[in-house]
Amino acid sequence: MNASMDTGAIVQSAYSAPRQATDLARRYTDVRAETERLCAPLVTEDYGIQTMPDVSPPKWHLAHTAWFFECFVLTPFVRDYSPYHPRYHYLFNSYYETVGQPYPRPRRGLLSRPTVAEIYDYRAYVDAAMLSLLQALPGIMPSADEDEVMRRTLLGVHHEQQHQELLLTDIKHIFAMNPLRPEYQQRPTDRTEARARSTWCEFDAGMRRVGHDGSEFAFDNETPRHKVYANAYAIASRLVTNGEYLQFMEAGGYAQPEHWLSDGWTTVRQQKWQAPLYWERYDGRWWHMTLSGMQPIDEWAPVCHVSLYEADAFARWRGKRLPTEAEWEVAASREPTTGNLRDAGYLHPRPAPTTAVPAQLFGDVWEWTCSAYGPYPGYRADKGALGEYNGKFMSNQVVLRGGSCVTAGEHVRSTYRNFFYPGDRWQFTGLRLADDR
């Protein structure tokens, strides 16, 4: 999903489920409504702010996700469909060069118009056309076209769920740049008193199969399923905590070049990093920005908002390493896709439960791996404009796994491949240690 996930993996291998247009229409309606529910705490002034090039204004997310359906479903498949506004195709195109020149990403925050109200009207206009189309299926066009409409609609639903996650991530950055440190939501009551110690989960050497088998929805970068050989290894039973990361900081980790990759050490000096993003120290205590405003650091919660460089440096400092994405997937494929995901409502990483081993594989934070983001053996990008979603971004980025506390629960799976540049920190990213056996 790259720097803002809208530069990410959003192409499925084949349409599979839901198979009925009525089910798909219901799914479409639910996801579209959820996006607008996530915007309910915002005021008009919040919608247009862009705090850095990687952050998009909330109203841009609202418009772009409507544009996706208008561009890839309604315009090509509905005869005489009239786009809502002739310039929206330019303003809300993210990076699809084959369908037209996109509006420059760093300038999205300069758009005072269209207004927030006009963008909500745009969404309603697209929704009416989409539901009319889906409710008329099947029988209004050749079956191959109907299958493609359903495939693209399901793809658009998953695309919108990615933007829901981005929406919360970007709101957090926007609010963090405000000296008032506003709250997106009140801090939920958390009665968890888990204090899970980290142990090792061991795996024997052998040939494994990884990647999606095509039985349900998947983005194309999860395919094809293929064999990998893994040496004997172990992964930690839980994520690295704030308290453990504080030990690295207090030991001078940010001042010791021997722990850092060369590019990472250069970045640390240039950016003057001394702690994870959003951390601040005052009155002798570390605090950090959350979606519930400034909160004291919980030493047992997973460390969050660290780059690949920081994750790798911590692992080296501990004499360990980050897992490969295949090692992570082998471990996660045995576990249920449950955890502290967005559905739980915390919107912040939580301490690991004491019962599950391995714990926190899904939710809390996206976990950095040491695997470069590239194609699986036999990978082929989708044809046409939708093929731009994945293949062209397979360069200079690193894979993350597992989802975060702002990821929709139905959106994660053990084969899901997220990806970011190694210096990115504004996403909910953390780490789990691995070791050789």
Image: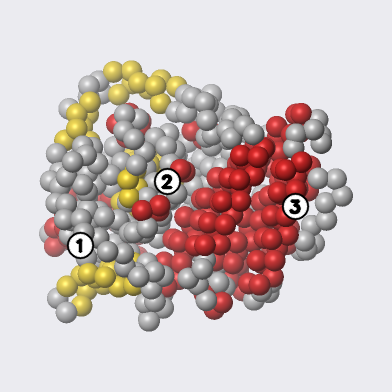
Q: Residue furthest bottom?
A: 180
Mark 3 residue type: Ala
Residue 45's image quarter?
Answer: bottom right
- Give the residue at mark 2: 409
Mark 2 residue type: Gly
Position of residue 390 in the picture relative to residue 370 (left or right): right
Q: Residue at x 42, y 34 (%)?
A: 415
On the question of residue 195 being in view, the answer is yes
The answer for how far apart the CA atoms under marks 3 and 2 are is 28 Å
Find numbered disc 2 in the image and state the secondary structure of the residue it sits on. Answer: helix
Marks 2 and 1: which is nearer the front?
2
Q: Residue furthest right?
A: 80
Position of residue 64 in the picture relative to residue 161 (left or right): right
Position of residue 429 in the picture relative to residue 18 (left or right): left
Q: Position of residue 36 (x, y in %)?
A: 56, 62
Marks 3 and 1: which is nearer the front?
3
Find numbered disc 1 in the image and state the secondary structure of the residue it sits on. Answer: loop
Mark seen at residue 53: none
The answer for how far apart the CA atoms under marks 3 and 1 are is 47 Å
Q: Residue at x 54, y 34 (%)?
A: 217
Q: Position of residue 333 (x, y in %)?
A: 35, 30
Q: Residue at x 28, y 44 (%)?
A: 360
Query: Residue 108 versus residue 166: which sits nearer the camera?
Result: 166
Q: Position of residue 154 (x, y in %)?
A: 61, 41
Mark seen at residue 298: 1
Mark seen at residue 129: 3
The answer for how far apart the CA atoms under marks 2 and 1 are is 24 Å
Query: Sequence-wise, which precedes: disc 3 or disc 2?
Result: 3
